[in-house]
Image (spheres, rainbow, N blue to C red):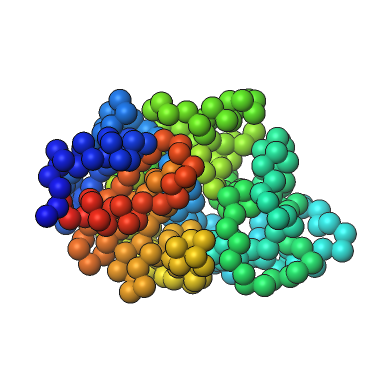
Amino acid sequence: MPLSKEELHSFIAEQQPNICQIATYKDGMEAYSDEWNNYRKNDACHVMSVTKSIVALLVGIAIDQNLIENINQPVLSFFPDYKIKRGEKTIQKVTVRHLLTMTAPYKYKYEPWTKICSSEDWTVSALDFLGGRAGLTGEFKYSTLGIHILTGIITKVSGMKTVDFANKYLFEPIGVEIHQNYLAETAEEHKEFTMSKAPKGHIWFCDPQGVGAAGYGLCLSAMDSAKIGQLCLDKGMCNGKQIVSSKWIEEMTEPYQKCGEEYQNMSYGYLWWIPDKKGNNYSAIGNSGNIIYVNTVNNLVIAVTSYFKPTIFDRVDFVQKYIEPIL
């Protein structure tokens, strides 16, 4: 027997205490929503790596507008003034596809947070770490900082700040709250942004150039997230308007990389996870249990926002076990 909505509310308060909001759509209609931890329905929460999946949609929109030719375009074609390091032979071959599928090679073992986040231009700093002696191995290497190059590309080709591009071509047309850039002036502010349990404004963490962080930093309500999931379920259509091409949604949610046990043996599309071997559902997943879960068979979207709790990687099992049944 599935839990009632009242039972689910109590169960979450006791067993999943960092959940802030849940919002769902069933057959295109808002079906169920609830809040915890003094969050209101329209409050925003830092959705962490769910940001990556939103960036994938923005890349698709930029391709639809012919701002990006295609995903096989070399990354350096967007940055003709970038000075390649001496002896570097790999960065020249890295394409947008490599960034989207997490198969880009980097010259680091652990993500260089201090180096990149204290720089004036995160895109250039990320480019400095791209490439390396091993060449293009096709190996899955999950990156939060390296893919900042993608928002750098969007900003470059559109002539707009990432947040303005997102507002105009994605958020406003589907009824997601308008967002503002947020720049942390100090390391302490950066840490507070990540660790704080309190509701956030509708902001996108950015670098000093105003380029939105591609790997994290977007703050959304669960209802905002659910609207994005519904857009994907509707193959890029909203209110009779094609926001992003159906071809891109299909490509974006195809499994390209099989990930190991570290990632619960899920597959990876273009910055979206495919937990289901049959490909019937796909998810945007962020640290601490933030998720946009799309079930294409049951015509269902479930979004969960959560404050920072690093022991929780994803909530696919939780969503399938406890939230799906009540819908």
Q: Nearer the viewer, residue 302 or 212?
A: 302
- The answer to whether residue 163 is above or below residue 250 is above
Relative placement, left or right, of 139 versus 249 is: right
Relative placement, left or right, of 237 versus 190 is: left
Q: Nearer the viewer, residue 134 or 99?
A: 134
The residue most toward the right is 86
Tell me how many marks there are: 0
The N terminus, quarter of image: bottom left
| Image location of residue 112, percent across then percent down | 70, 46
Q: Which of 184 and 317 is in front in this view?
A: 317
Residue depicted at x 87% and y 64%: 87
Q: Quadrant of residue 306?
A: top left
Q: Do we see residue 270 in this rendering?
A: no
| Image location of residue 169, percent across then percent down | 41, 47
Relative placement, left or right, of 131 versus 197 is: right
Q: In which quarter of the image is residue 246?
A: bottom left
- The answer to whether residue 324 is above or below residue 138 is above
Residue depicted at x 81% and y 53%: 83
Residue depicted at x 37% and y 33%: 44
- The answer to whether residue 315 is above or below residue 205 is below
| Image location of residue 24, percent across then percent down | 23, 47
| Image location of residue 171, percent across then percent down | 37, 43
Q: Do we see residue 266 in this rendering?
A: yes
Residue depicted at x 28% and y 53%: 319
